[in-house]
Image (cartoon, rainbow, N blue to C red):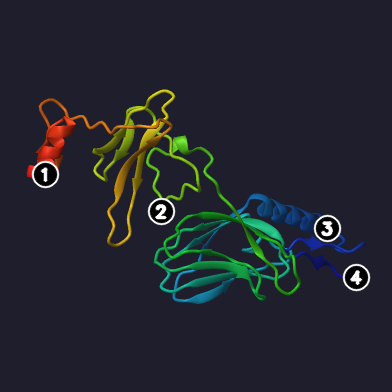
Amino acid sequence: MASTFTPLGVELQATGENAGTWGTKTNTNLQIIEQISGGYIAKSIAGGAQTTALSVSDGSTGAELSHRMIEFTGTISGNQIVTIPIDVQTFYFLRNSTSGAHTVQFKYASGSGDSFTFSATDKGDAIVFATANDGTNPDIDTIALGISNIVEDTTPQLGGNLDTNSFMIDFDDDHGIRDENGNEQLQFQTTASAVNHFDITNAATGNNPSITAVGDDSNISINLIPKGTGEVQANGVGLATTGKAIAMAIVFG
């Protein structure tokens, strides 16, 4: 009975087979297993739009798909598809180091199961699991890469709009928001056990946005405090600091 091979190329020897070469084949199998558990390969997928099949090499360490980490390289001028055989079941660390604004899709060679795709601008890393969960339409599952320690990233950048998902943004006292040049634009001061605050509301066509005092108290004034000899202005016109004077300034401007 002849040897058989796993989808990743490990040789399964039959009883009594390979007399005199059993040790060599076993060593090769161990090297393949080592490669599967922690091996790295750089795979060039340079060129125009194309499909690239990662190679299988039964009983040899040369199989491209039998590496834990695969880094895609090369200049691409079209969208790329990289495939593995439909019976492979393992997980991969993928890195997209290609140049060129095109997608790189990682999928099974056939079927309509889920796949993973680096977007045209995503030159990053991904962890995927090739499930082999269906003989016809197996899935490539994506394992989410969360931020393990954001404190260590001293220059974090968003890849899209920040959605707080119904949570708040907490500011430390005397901290706030800067402009793109690093200049202070809005700074927050905290008050212990605060119960009153501002509500800023945008508006549809024909309506005015508003800044409203809200909170637990029944009556809440809004306190605008200039610095030094500065003044509170409305549309460039200075306003006095008493209610009557403000009303007169608005009426008689």
Q: In the rendered image, is residue 54 in sight?
A: no
Cα gap from disc 3 to disc 2, whole angstroms = 59 Å
Q: Given contact means CB atoms under 8 Å apart, are the residues at marks 3 and 2 in contact? A: no
Vertical comparison of 126 with 53: above or below: above
Q: Amino acid at mark 3?
A: Trp
Q: The residue tagged with tag 4: helix, strand or loop?
A: loop
Badge 4: residue crowd in 10 Å (few <14, some 14–19, many ≥20): few
In the image, residue 131 sits, relative to residue 39, either above or below, namely: below
Task: Identify the residue position indicated by label 3 in the image.
Answer: 22
Taking the spot 47% from the left edge, 38% from the top edge, the residue there is 150
N-terminal label among 1 and 2: 2
Instruction: Single out the mark in the foreground, 4 or 2.
Output: 2
Q: Name the spot of residue 115 as percent of width and height, x first.
A: 60, 67
The residue wearing badge 1 is 251
Which numbered disc covers residue 1? 4
Q: Which residue is mark 2?
A: 161
Within-10-Å neighbours for mark 3: few <14, some 14–19, many 20+? few
* Amino acid marked by disc 1: Val
